Image: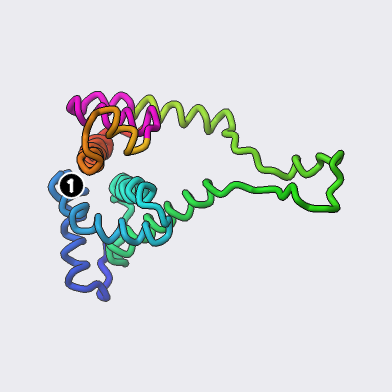
């Protein structure tokens, strides 16, 4: 793999860590995560403008980057590649969240004309998308059971039961800060399990 002569000293150091990760060194993944998690989080937060979403999207970006690490090209700095993945992932997330709204206050609208309904995009998965989603959910649930009980419970409450951080704190009688910190750790552990598991 040809390395660009334009890479900075910092980028060359990152490239060596990436090579170690590709060779199966788990500590290399941890080094990359610790080195860039804050900068990726704040970049994502700037786009998403929501702290909870930013935390989830930051982890998703690392999961995608680590899963596709073998495709990284040293023609660019690892940080550039990672930030591009995080940025694209966040923009996709925002697009999916956007809902098409229809104004019901237009004075000249014909109350008997419902043709505008046909122009509203339905947020419905195709059968293939739904099958893939279910397969991925099953795959992830299989891995969640490998976590320690306290981490498994947090992941299940947050992602399977879709409780808010506040609801989880109340349910487990824990301080909100503790829930956020432990859930962050739980996602780190799950991410590590997933990146070393055979994907579906």
Q: Is residue 12 left or right of residue 163?
A: left
Q: Is residue 60 above or below residue 77?
A: above
| Residue at x 75% of width, y 40% of height | 117
Indicate the quadrant containing the C terminus: top left, top right, bottom left or bottom right.
Answer: top left
| Residue at x 21% of width, y 48% of height | 22
Between 148 and 79, the one nearer to me in the picture: 148
Between 101 and 139, the one nearer to me in the picture: 101
Q: Is residue 181 above or below residue 156?
A: below
Q: Which residue is mark 1?
A: 23
Query: Which color mode does the image show?
Result: rainbow
The count of marks equals 1
Q: Is residue 151 left or right of residue 59?
A: left
In the rendered image, residue 100, in percent from the top left (x then y), is placed at 64, 48
32 within the magenta span: no
In the rendered image, residue 153, in percent from the top left (x then y), is placed at 26, 27
Magenta stretch: give its range. 141-163
Q: Is residue 193 left or right of residue 93?
A: left
146 within the magenta span: yes
- Residue 125 at least partly seen: yes
In the rendered image, residue 115, in percent from the top left (x then y), is placed at 81, 41
Between 84 and 17, the one nearer to me in the picture: 84
| Residue at x 14% of width, y 46% of height | 25
């Amino acid at each position: 793999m040809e390395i660009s002569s334009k890479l900075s000293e910092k980028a060359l150091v990152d490239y060596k860590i990436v090579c170690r990760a590709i060779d199966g060194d788990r500590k290399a993944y941890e080094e990359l995560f610790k080195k860039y998690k804050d900068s990726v989080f704040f970049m994502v937060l700037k786009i998403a403008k929501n702290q909870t979403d930013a935390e989830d999207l930051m982890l998703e970006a690392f999961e995608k980057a680590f899963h596709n690490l073998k495709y990284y090209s040293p023609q660019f700095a690892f940080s550039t590649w990672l930030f591009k993945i995080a940025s694209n992932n966040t923009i996709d997330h925002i697009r999916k969240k956007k809902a098409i709204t229809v104004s019901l206050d237009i004075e000249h609208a014909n109350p008997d004309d419902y043709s505008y309904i046909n122009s509203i995009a339905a947020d419905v998965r195709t059968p293939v998308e739904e099958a893939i989603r279910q397969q991925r959910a099953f795959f992830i649930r299989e891995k969640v059971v490998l976590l320690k009980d306290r981490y498994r419970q947090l992941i299940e409450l947050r992602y399977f039961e879709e409780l808010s951080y506040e609801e989880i704190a109340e349910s487990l009688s824990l301080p909100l800060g503790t829930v956020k910190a432990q859930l962050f750790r739980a996602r780190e552990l799950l991410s590590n399990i997933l990146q070393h598991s055979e994907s579906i």
